[in-house]
Amino acid sequence: MSNRRLYIVLALVFIFITLLVVRLFNVQILQAEELKFKADRQQTKVEIIKAERGTILDRNNVALALNINTVSISIDLRMLPQNEKDKTAQVFSQVFGKPKQVYLSLFSEKGKTICVEKKVLSAKAEMIKNAKIKGLLISEDPTRSYPYSSLASHVIGYVNADFLGTNGIERAYNDELKGIDGKRLVERNALGEMITVAEDQTVKSVQGANLVLTIDNNYQKILEEELKNGLSTYGGISATGIIMDPNTGEILALANENDYDPNFYSKYSDTLRRNIAVTDMYEPGSTFKSFSMAALLDRKLCEESERIFVENGKYKYKNVNINDSHNKDYLTVRGIIEQSSNIGIAKLIQRLDDDTFYKYIRAFGFGNFTSIKLPGEVKGNVKNPNDWHNVTKAFMSFGYEILVTPIQLAAAYCAIVNGGILYQPQILKRVILPNGMITEELTPKKVRTVISAETSAKMRSFLTGVVSNGTATAAKLDGIIAGGKTGTSQKLINGSYSKSHYNSSFVGFFPVNNPKVVCLILVNSPTSGGYGGLVAAPIFKKVGDRIVSSDPVSFNKQGGSKDGEVKVIYANNNQKMNDVSLGNNSKQITESIKKKIMPDLYGFSLKEAVNILAKNGIKYKVKGSGKIASQSIKAGSQLKKNVECTIVCSENVTGKNKN
C-alpha cells in the first residue's frame, strides 16, 4: 500500500515537473519575444514633453499671459498596497488641506491609474515626492496664468483644459503660441518609479513664440476703470471702449464691461466672454453724421458757413417725421454737426446721389470685415442702394438703417481725423522666437484713402466745435483740446424703436492739431442721462484726462498744445541765461544759484522762468500760460538732485512779487 502511494506521489511530482518544464519552455523559448515586448511596454513608455506656451506681452513688454510650471499627480492603484492607502490619504490631506476621506474615496475606485491632483505647484509636488508613495506618477501639467486677472480679457482670451487657445489672441495666434511638443522614452520599475530616460531617443520640445501686442497696459487699465465707473454712475447693460492710434491703426486699448477673469473662465457665461467690440452690431446714431458730412465736403456740395433751415426741430419728410432735440430755425453747415441736427444732415445728404453716398460708406469700411485678428468679427450690415426705400438715405445720414460694429466705427473715425486714410486695425505688434529673433514686425496697413486731407482738416475743425460749444461740452479735456461726436440711437426691440432704451456713444480724438488718440465710448441702455453727450462724453473726458496726465511729454511733442495744456520740458544744464533780462531780480537769482536753493519764480514770464530753472539744472513741468503764479518747490528751500518743479502760469499775474 505504501509503495502504491509512493508511486502516485512520484507520478504527480513527475507530471508537475513536466508541466513546469513545458511552461518554462513556452515562456522562455516559444513566447519569449512576445512576453518581452509586453514587459517592455509596461515598463517603458513614450512620454510627451509639453512645449512651453509663448508669453503674451503689451507694447511695453508687460506680461499679460504667461506659463506657470505645475504638474499633475497620479497613483497607479495596482502598486499601492491596501494597508498603505490610509497613510497615503493622510499625506495628501496634510499637503493640500482637503479631508482625508476625499482621497480614500479616490483610492477605492477601480482602475489602474487615477489622477489625484492637477495643476500642482512645484513646492507641494516636492512634498508628495518626499513621502515615497508607491505607484506615484508625476507629469508636467503647465498652468496658463493671467497675472492682471480680468485686464484686457476680451483681447487676450484664454486656453481650455487641453491648453489650446479658445478665445481672443490665445485662439487667433494659437499656432504661434503653442510651440511643438517633444517626447522621451522612460523606463519605470514595478512601483512606477522612473529608472532611466533614453536620451538618444529624446526629442526636445520647442517653446512657442512670444507675442507683443499693440495694447498699452496703462491705457487699458484707465479705459477699464472708467468704463466700470461709468456703468456705476449711469447704469446700463454693458459698456465698450476702444482706443486707437489714428496714424497706424494700432489698438492701444479695447475693453468691454462687464468682463471676466480668464484664470477662471468656466465660471463665466458665454455672453460675458464674448468680445462685443467686434461681434455685436448696432445703429450708430449721430456719430454717423461725421461720415455723411465728410462725403458732402469731399464732393464740395456744401460750404461751412452756408445756412440751412432746420424747421424748428420738426420736419416731415416723405410722410415720415424727422426730429431734432432742439428747436433751431437756421443752422450753418458747421452748426449742423456741432448741434447734431438730424434734419440738417437729412436735407444736405439729398445733394449726394445714392451710389456715391453708398461708395463713401463702403470706403470707410462699413459693411466689410476690418480683418482685425480677433475671433468672431462680423461685418455689419449696409443695404445696397437697390434695396433702399424712399427715406433710407435720409435715415442713414444720421445713423439709422445701418448696422456697424464698435471696431468699424473707431477705425473709420481714425480716417476722418488722420488726413483721410483708412488703416486696418491691428492688435499684434511683433512675433518673437524664444531665441530673441523677431519673425514678424507689423507695420501700418493702409486700406485706402477715403477723403482728402483738406476734407479731413475741415472735419477735425467741425468736431472740435462739437466739444467746445456743441453737444459734447462734457468731453472737454483739461489742458489739451479734443474733438469728437456724440451719438444717441434708439434700440430696436421686438420690431419697434424703444423710447427708453438707447445706445449712448461718443467718439473723440486729441490733440486736435495732430491727433494721436481716437477713443470710442459706447454705453448700452444707460438708466440715467440717456444721451451720448451726457453719458459717453463724460466717460471720454475722464479717460482722456488720465491718459494725458500719465504721459504729458508724448502729447506735448505731438503738437496741438494750446493755452492751459500741460507741457513737460527737461532742463538743459548748458542753457545760458544771458538772453533774458531779469532786471532788479538778477542778483536774487544769481545768489540762489550759488547757494543751490530754489529761487522765487512768482511773476516771471514763462521764458524767464524756464531759463532760471535750466541754469539750476532743474527739470520742470508747465501748466497754463502767462506769468508764473505758483511753484511746487517752495522758494528758498534747499535743492536736491533730480528734482522736478511744476510751475503754474496764469494770465492774471500782474507783476513780480517783491516779498
Image (tube, rainbow, N blue to C red):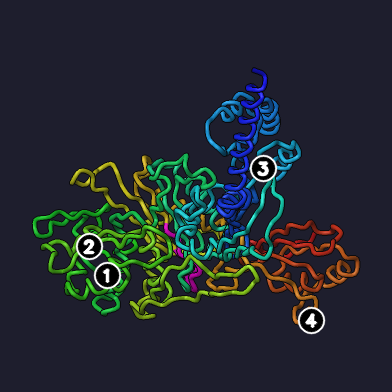
Q: Is residue 3 above or below residue 416?
A: above
The image quarter containing residue 99 is top right
Q: CA distance from mark 3 to mark 1?
A: 72 Å
Label 2, residues with CA under 10 Å away: few <14, some 14-19, many ≥20: many
Amino acid on which disc 1 is placed: Ile
Can you identify the residue that label 3 sits on?
A: 190
Instruction: Check contact, mark 1 vs mark 2: CB within 8 A.
Output: yes
Q: Does the magenta portion include 580?
A: no
Report the mark closest to the observer, 4 or 3: 3
Q: CA distance from mark 1 to mark 2?
A: 10 Å
Q: Earlier in the sequence, mark 1 or mark 2?
A: 1
**Mark 4 or mark 1, earlier in chain:** 1
Tell me the quadrant of the picture where the N terminus can be found: top right
Q: How many marks?
A: 4
Q: CA–CA distance between discs 4 and 1?
A: 59 Å
Q: Position of residue 202 (x, y in %)?
A: 64, 63
How far apart are labels 2 and 3 at the CA level?
76 Å
Residue 340 rendering spot, x and y as whole percentages: 30, 59
- Residue situated in front as seen by the camera: 413 or 345: 413
Query: Which range of residues does the magenta coloring cover?
Result: 509-520
Examine the image and state in which quarter residue 19 appears.
top right
Q: Secondary structure at mark 1?
A: helix
| Label 1 sits on residue | 361
Q: Circle 2 sits on which residue?
A: 396
Q: Earlier in the sequence, mark 4 or mark 3?
A: 3
Question: In the depicted view, which residue is nearer to us: 464 or 521?
Answer: 521
